[in-house]
Amino acid sequence: MLILIWYTSAMKLFLVRHGETDANRILGHGVSGPMHDEPVTFKPGDDTNIPLNIYGRTQAREAAEELPSVINRIYSSKLLRVKETAGIIAETKKIDPSRIELRDELLEYHQGSLEGLSTEQKKARLAEGQSWGSGSLCEYDYSPWGGDSAEIIRARLESFLKELKAVEGNGNIICVTSGGTIRMTYKILFSDRSPGITKHVVIKNGSVHEFIL
């Protein structure tokens, strides 16, 4: 699925969400349809830093086909699911995998001790009146549980986007990342003109989001 968003200036930035993992499927993170036939070991509460499943690997190859033939730079977060997606894209586009640059700014926000839990499990751990906020609105705060806040993610992503515009110039830049990072990019670039845009953006596994910076 290719989503086109026109912004300003010359550099084309393609943000790609990683392919599906079993954590996405078990936790119900926008995943539907039948379970695959491969062994499933993830259960709520486990480490979410896991590789792609069979659907995710297919989604990565399909995402590569949506990307331009000429790619000037490819960035990735260091999460296993994201690195694997970036590697499949590089292989499909005949790009030397050594050209993939890992950047912490592209990491998904971490939920601390709530990471990997189902919604019901997370709520069970909250004290009365506590809330982690809203991921769809980019108004979350997991710092009480040792995780990230939306302010932290926004600050590091704004810094990264500023660096890209200053250093990369023209060309096609690929950033393989996670849903929360892509959603925050929409908020940074468009919330002044379209408040609440993040609530309406669909960010499926393997989706490609194009911006012009």
Image (cartoon, grey):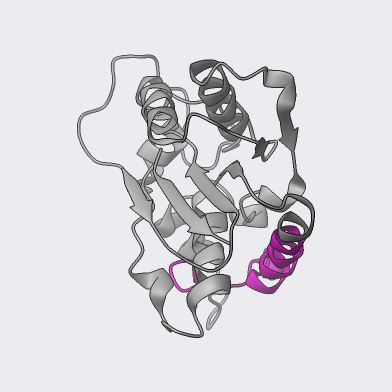
Which stretch did the figure color magenta?
Answer: 134-162
Q: As drawn, is 123 to the left or to the right of 109?
A: left
Q: Position of residue 171 (x, y in %)?
A: 62, 45
Q: Is residue 42 magenta?
A: no
For residue 156, what is the image quadrant? bottom right
Seen in the picture, residue 142 relative to 192 is either above or below; the reply is above
Of 175 and 13, nearer the camera is 13
Of 148 and 4, nearer the camera is 4
Which residue is depicted at the point 39% across and 28% down?
65
Q: As drawn, is 155 to the left or to the right of 200?
A: right
Which residue is depicted at the point 61% across and 20% down?
95
Q: As drawn, is 81 to the left or to the right of 208?
A: right
Which residue is depicted at the point 72% across and 55% down?
164
Residue 162 is at least partly visible in this image: yes
Which residue is depicted at the point 36% across and 14% down?
38
Residue 132 is at least partly visible in this image: no
Seen in the picture, residue 160 relative to 8 is either above or below; the reply is above
- Location of the N terminus (image quadrant): top left
Q: Position of residue 3 (x, y in %)?
A: 35, 52
Q: Is residue 148 magenta?
A: yes
Q: Position of residue 89 (x, y in %)?
A: 52, 25
